[in-house]
Image (cartoon, grey):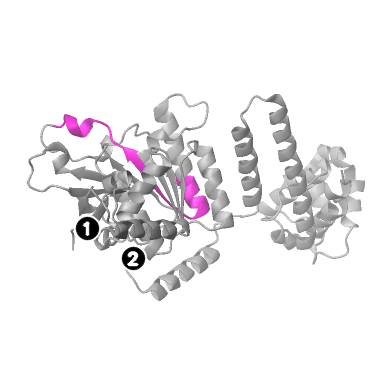
């Protein structure tokens, strides 16, 4: 092992020396390094106390520092060590560079620790390989994000806001998010917004997968969005049957049976080729929340990612140790909301509803309280859309094939209902609202 990569005591001393020489220079490194980043235990204590003195506006010099330390001064080398530190540098102008060296060495040690811990976990064989991979990836993500400081200062916040405002102006549209392809829905939601957790919930066979697929395909082909679809409910062949039926307007039953005319064969072949080269990825064998997050992180870094779709919540496997399924679901939705923020993506999460709508004697329209295993679904979600079809409950109703998309929660926009015409034969939906 190359010891020189593990630490640099000269850089540590020069950071401390610079602060003694110019108290204001601490501002150059206070957001860059923490006391834990120092290798020397003495230097950790000295830096921690210098930061505390700066916070309390106590002037820093050898006298005030030694007075603050009192009897504990001996434990860190006494006055002689403080004098040695002060004399180790002749200028404070390079403190930021010294701080960067200290941080680099700290990151190296932390990386070694992550890999050593991962190896130890593998040797003990108490955790699955998936859990070890998740530990390593999460640790690396935390290490990577540890240098990103949220200072709370208004200047960078306003700079980012003005950039966003300028982008809105240049786009010149009311809909600022990724368009769903349905004007009435986009008007209500403002499009699919980055960092949002969007819930699309319904009773079984209500049309939620079809609705989600239509939105996905519109975003991929009209908006050029990059989409990851985690299909937990169906096999890959079943989902492709639906996708091609929507795209070609050929009845899904004909595609399933391969009962196609020459013209339809040509259309299906062409459509399949288009999807093969599209920005859409479909995953059929990833059920665990940690693996979903891991795959999304890799996609974001390697290829970019705009929308994550998961069908559906009740099939996601959570982390170990949850007291019950409600607690597990709460943890899953919280993790997905945090992932949306971390990766700057929209998460469209499909979910089942409880049987409560059937139990109501008159109006079977779903409510937020009907979210199955609700936990914190409603709390974590930015948008909740509930689907309802009258002909689901009344086979003799006048309006058949009408889906009501009830926007029951919209943290940053309007509530309302958007009506769709649904043709299950080809899995397509059309918005009826003007």
Q: CA distance from mark 2 to mark 1?
A: 17 Å
Quadrant of residue 192 within the rendered picture = bottom left
Residue 107 or residue 22, whichever sits in front: 107
- The residue that label 1 is drawn on is 431
Q: Quadrant of the C terminus?
A: bottom left
Magenta residues, start to end: 337-360
**164, above or below 267, in the image:** below
Q: Tell me residue 287's x, y (percent).
A: 47, 36
Query: Which disc, if any, is residue 354?
Result: none
* Residue pictured at 33% horizontal, 65% vertical: 175
* Residue pictured at 41% horizontal, 27% vertical: 325
**76, above or below 431, in the image:** above
**373, above or below 167, in the image:** above
Q: Regarding mark 2 in the picture, which secondary structure is present there? A: loop
Q: Quadrant of the N terminus?
A: top right
At label 1, counting other C-alpha atoms closer than 10 Å, the crowd grade (few under 14, some 14-19, many 20 or more) is some
Instruction: Check if residue 216 falls in the magenta segment.
Output: no
Q: Earlier in the sequence, mark 2 or mark 1?
A: 2
- The residue that label 2 is drawn on is 175
């Amino acid at each position: 092992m190359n010891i020189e990569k593990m630490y640099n005591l000269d850089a540590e001393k020069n950071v401390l020396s610079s602060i003694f020489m110019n108290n204001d220079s601490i501002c150059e490194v206070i957001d860059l390094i923490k006391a834990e980043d120092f290798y020397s235990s003495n230097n950790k204590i000295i830096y921690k106390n210098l930061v505390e003195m700066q916070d309390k506006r106590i002037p820093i010099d050898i006298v005030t520092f030694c007075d603050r330390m009192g009897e504990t001064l001996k434990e860190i080398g006494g006055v002689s060590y403080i004098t040695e530190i002060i004399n180790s540098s002749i200028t404070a102008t390079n403190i930021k560079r010294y701080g960067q060296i200290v941080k680099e060495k700290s990151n190296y040690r932390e990386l070694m620790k992550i890999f050593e811990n991962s190896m130890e976990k593998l040797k003990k064989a108490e955790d699955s390989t998936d859990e070890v991979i998740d530990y390593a990836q999460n640790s690396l993500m935390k290490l990577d994000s540890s240098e990103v400081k949220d200072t709370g200062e208004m200047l960078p916040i306003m700079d980012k806001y003005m950039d966003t405002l300028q982008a809105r102006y240049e786009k010149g549209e009311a809909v600022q998010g990724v368009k769903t392809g349905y004007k009435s829905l986009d008007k209500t939601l403002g499009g699919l917004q980055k960092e949002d957790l969007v819930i699309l919930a319904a009773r079984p066979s209500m049309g939620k997968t079809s609705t989600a697929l239509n939105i996905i395909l519109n975003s991929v082909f009209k908006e050029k969005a990059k989409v990851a679809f985690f299909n937990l409910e169906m096999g890959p062949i079943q989902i492709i049957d639906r996708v091609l039926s929507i795209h070609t307007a050929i009845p899904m039953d004909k595609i399933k049976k391969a009962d196609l005319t020459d013209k339809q064969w040509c259309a299906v072949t062409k459509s399949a080729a288009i999807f093969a080269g599209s920005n859409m990825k479909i995953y059929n064998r990833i059920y665990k929340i940690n693996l979903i997050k891991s795959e999304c992180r890799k996609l974001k870094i390697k290829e970019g990612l705009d929308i994550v779709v998961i069908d559906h919540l009740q099939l996601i496997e959570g982390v170990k140790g949850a007291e019950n399924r409600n607690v597990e679901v709460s943890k899953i939705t919280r993790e997905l909301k945090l992932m949306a923020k971390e990766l700057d993506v929209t998460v469209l999460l499909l979910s089942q509803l409880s049987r409560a709508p059937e139990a109501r004697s008159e109006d079977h329209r779903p409510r937020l309280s009907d979210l199955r295993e609700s936990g914190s679904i409603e709390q974590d979600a930015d948008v909740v859309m509930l689907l309802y079809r009258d002909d689901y409950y009344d086979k003799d109703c006048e309006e058949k094939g009408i889906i009501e998309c009830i926007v029951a929660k919209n943290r940053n926009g309007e509530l309302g209902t958007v009506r769709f015409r649904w043709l299950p034969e080809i899995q397509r939906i059309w918005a009826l609202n003007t």
